Amino acid sequence: MNKISSIHTLPRPGALKKQAASVQFRNVTKRYGNVTAVDDVSFTIEPGQLVTLLGPSGCGKTTTLRMIAGLEMASEGQILIGGRDVTNLSAADRDVSMVFQSYALFPHMSVLENVAYGPSVQGVSKKDAYEMAMEKLSLIGLKGLEKRAPSELSGGQQQRVAVARALVLEPQVLLFDEPLSNLDAKLRRRVREDIRELQQSLNLTVAYVTHDQEEALAVSDHIIVMSNARIAQTGAPRELYEEPANLFVADFIGDANIINGELVSIAGPMAQVSIGNLSLQLPHRNANQGTVKLAVRPDAILLDESAPIAGALTGTVRKASYLGTQVEYEVETAIGNLFVVQYGRKEPIAPGTPVSISFTTQRGVAIIPHA
């Protein structure tokens, strides 16, 4: 697969003629017979933001995206785009464009013809449609490839053609449905950076669907985490990672060790929490005294194999995996098996080694308030 070039010639914000629009869901429900695919969902995407709908298969994220597009109609509730009620409007009457997971390029058409297709079917002259298409192909770094067939392009280039075809009509809202799932890992990282740069440079309102947590954290202004047809939590990427609202989000966003602790006392916003024989000071997050669940990120756990530390939590390394930039461990302890990540270490701690365990509380350990 060919390496794609970066987007270096993006226009200044506001280059598209239309202003970015907000998207608002008000108590939206979608049913298929007796099955509820989306259940009483409310959220707002502010103009010019990229918001990701994230969750496992079957959680309702793609159905939600299709309701924005008008490809599915809401059973209840209200959908507004740019303050305009579009709840009962068809896809053709909404000013949105979608980039599909499969790209859906016409194999018998050239790249230029694919991108010019939208304006052409709307009655724009062939000359003007081609000019509009060339402008967008130049924008995304595909100038010079306009005569090629889709089959002659790499996966990353095909994805860019799909984006150009969505942009050519200058929609108020751009929708992405798992846009990187057909690309290999390195190309996914490169293309997601290009999508983010494009969105920010053109001040586009984007709704983006993925099940890939890393992808969501990398590209989003805000993330809406969905579970079982409802919103589990919404917030900025860092907020969701560092302050999960419930067990599902803690476990789904990145890797986390879910362990029990004892909330001993509260003073102002902080709480004293005991984990085994360790004591930590953590934000209480409205939890009450007693047993609490904690989300502990793998890189927030420190291992010391040099000598036992008096009063420390102890464990034994059971597995060690060297992954180049990091070493991953499974450590057996009195509070359960822990998944631990160490960065920058060349020689892993050997399995069977006893270790002392401590925690870095800076953003790595959080009380789960609704466990």
Image (cartoon, rainbow, N blue to C red):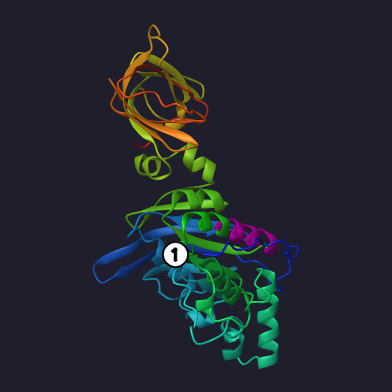
Instruction: Please say if 83 is above or below 71.
Output: above
Q: Is residue 71 in the magenta section?
A: no
Q: Which residue appears at 65% of the width and 68% of the height?
A: 140
- Residue 220 visible to an observer of this rendering: no
Q: Which residue type does callout 1 highlight?
A: Asn
x and y percent of residue 306 in the render?
A: 42, 12
- Which residue bears the numbered disc 1? 182
x and y percent of residue 243 in the render?
A: 47, 37
x and y percent of residue 178 in the render?
A: 45, 63
The answer to which quarter of the image holds residue 50 is bottom right
| Residues in magenta, as a range | 192-202
Direction top: furthest residue: 310
Depth check: give the residue in front, 259 or 29: 259
The answer to which quarter of the image holds residue 195 is bottom right
Depth check: give the residue in front, 322 or 360: 322
Label 1 residue SS = loop
Q: Which residue appears at 35% of the width and 67% of the height?
A: 30
Q: Does the magenta stretch mainly form a helix, a strand or a loop?
A: helix
